[in-house]
Image: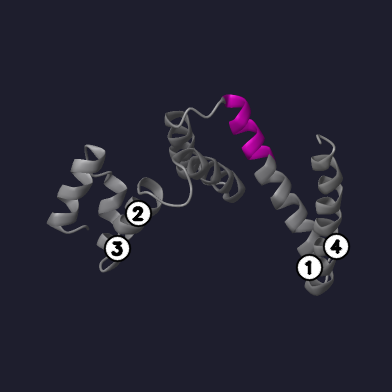
Amino acid sequence: MVSTQTQQEIERTLGQVPSWMNQLAEPASDHSWGIFRDLTLGESELTPREKALVGVGVAAAVGCPYCSHFHREEARLAEVSDDELEETVTLAGTTRYFSTVLHGNEIDLDDFVDETDEIVNYLKEQEAPAAGADD
């Protein structure tokens, strides 16, 4: 259960203390709120919109209905469209699919990294002429 001070801060921030936050074991409860507050609600390198899209994708990939609901609502607050939500979930599913293929086939990580570097370099080379075409 969160401390009285943390409980008051949560109430000021969210309008209530969600019941699940009272299920957090000590000593993690106050710290858990801090992580949620700072990463989800606080200013960071990611915009609220980007955070919401990451949350939707991860929630879908791990199959968590609680997180899926929360992050979809968070995304709607950030004016993410239904098409963007669908694409985010599809991208998360694609990542999970290929992760399964890579792990299941025991693809060598070093070879994968080398191939990825080659692909990135190729794509960068393709972008350079296209960017110069406007001149």
At label 3, counting other C-alpha atoms closer than 10 Å, the crowd grade (few under 14, some 14-19, many 20 or more) is some
The mark closer to the camera, 2 or 4, is 4
Q: Which numbered disc flags the more N-terminal residue, 4 or 1?
A: 1
Q: Which residue is mark 1?
A: 113
Q: Which numbered disc flags the more N-terminal residue, 2 or 4?
A: 2
Residue 38 disc label: 2
Q: Quadrant of the N terminus?
A: bottom left
Q: Quadrant of the C terminus?
A: top right
Task: Name the residue at the front extreme.
Answer: 135
Task: Examine the rendered structure and indicate whether residue 37 appears above or below residue 69.
Answer: below
Q: What's the residue type where badge 1 is placed?
A: Val
Residue 118 disc label: 4
Residue lying at 31% horizontally and 49% vertically, measured from the top left:
20
Q: What's the residue type where badge 3 is placed?
A: His
> Does the stretch in magenta take in 111?
no
| Residue 106 seen in this snapshot | no
